[in-house]
Image (spheres, rainbow, N blue to C red):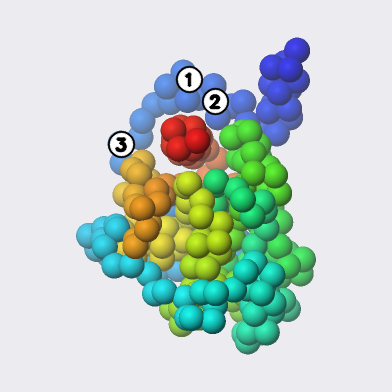
Amino acid sequence: MVADSRQARLEELGLTLWQQRVRSGPPAPAAEPAEPPPSEPAAAGPPESVEMPPMTGSTPPPAPSPDVAAMDWDELAAHLAGCDHRGATRPVFGVGARDADLMIIGEAPGAEEDRRGEPFVGRAGKLLDRMLFAMGRGRTRNAYIANICKFRPPENRDPKAEEVAADRPILERQIELLSPKLIVAVGRVAAQTLLETQAPLGKLRGQVHTYPGRSLPLLVTYHPAYLLRSPQHKNRAWEDLREAMRLLDAAA
Ligand code: URA
């Protein structure tokens, strides 16, 4: 009965197709396509053809400055609110359970996130919620969602290096405070930033990385905005989510 209602809910959310495709073994395409940048929130980014060797787990990210490193969640959110908004309406700090074992990290807020002050609340966010649901999770119950960039970049462009650098101490402190068992980076910008690499998303998916400087596993999957435009890749995203569930189960 419970299984029936879960199945019905999954069908309602359009997720059963993913599982059916996975079970029946989708035909593998000849080459892994590179993921273009998500339309939410970023505009077209640099081409992915220039490929650098992955440097996963090499250099630790910059440590939060002493003041930020000592802050608790509320102090950190208040500190962010006092930072330069760089033209955004408001900061988008993060949302979720502050004791979650799973942390989802995206790129930067889009228009809807900028309006509401919460990450992933636009169309892509709805799909992210469905992805979490398929993992038996909810955004406020047992996951924490944050972005690399805490302020919406003007015109939804890709965040600049200096914007990423400015917000990095906040993200680092969030990771420290949460101390998750697993990070899932969604999309190219989040993955490349966290893993300090220029490798394309297609190369970063499908392996368990270690977050630089911490013994913390990190998986990479497609950005939900990309999946909205390229639903044929949902089966691969589902494979990534199943790997995430497996790692979380093993770490429990
Ligand atoms: N895309 C992101 O990467 N983050 C958001 O919060 C919304 C869309």
Q: Secondary structure at mark 2?
A: helix
Which mark is on residue 19? 2
Q: Secondary structure at mark 1?
A: helix
Tag 3–tag 1 contact (CB < 8 Å): no
- Dots 1, 2 in contact, CB < 8 A: yes
Number of callouts? 3
Callout 1 crowding tier (Cα within 10 Å): few <14, some 14–19, many ≥20: few
Give the image location of residue 120, x and y in percent: 66, 57
Residue at 42 percent across and 58 percent down: it is 191
* 157 with respect to 11 (left or right): left
Check disc 3 and give the amino acid type: Ala
* Point 43% across, 26% down: residue: 26
Q: Is residue 83 above or below residue 214?
A: below
Query: Disc 2, ligand 1: is the CB inside 8 Å?
Result: no
Q: Is residue 187 left or right of residue 98?
A: left
**Residue 212 horizontal/vertical position (percent):** 34, 61
In this rendered view, identify the residue nearer to me: 182 or 47: 182
For the residues marked 2 and 3, what is the alpha-carbon distance in whole angstroms? 21 Å
Q: Amino acid at mark 2?
A: Gln
Quadrant of the rendered image containing residue 62: bottom left
Residue under numbered circle 1: 23
Closest to the observer, 55 or 236: 55
Residue 158 appears in the picture as rendered: no
Q: Residue furthest front?
A: 70
Q: Work out which quarter of the rendered image holds the N terminus and state it.
A: top right
User: In this rendering, does residue 81 appear at all?
Assistant: yes
For marks 1 and 2, give the CA distance: 6 Å
Q: Which residue is mark 3?
A: 30
Residue at position x 51%, y 51% in the image:
180
Name the amino acid, label 1.
Answer: Arg
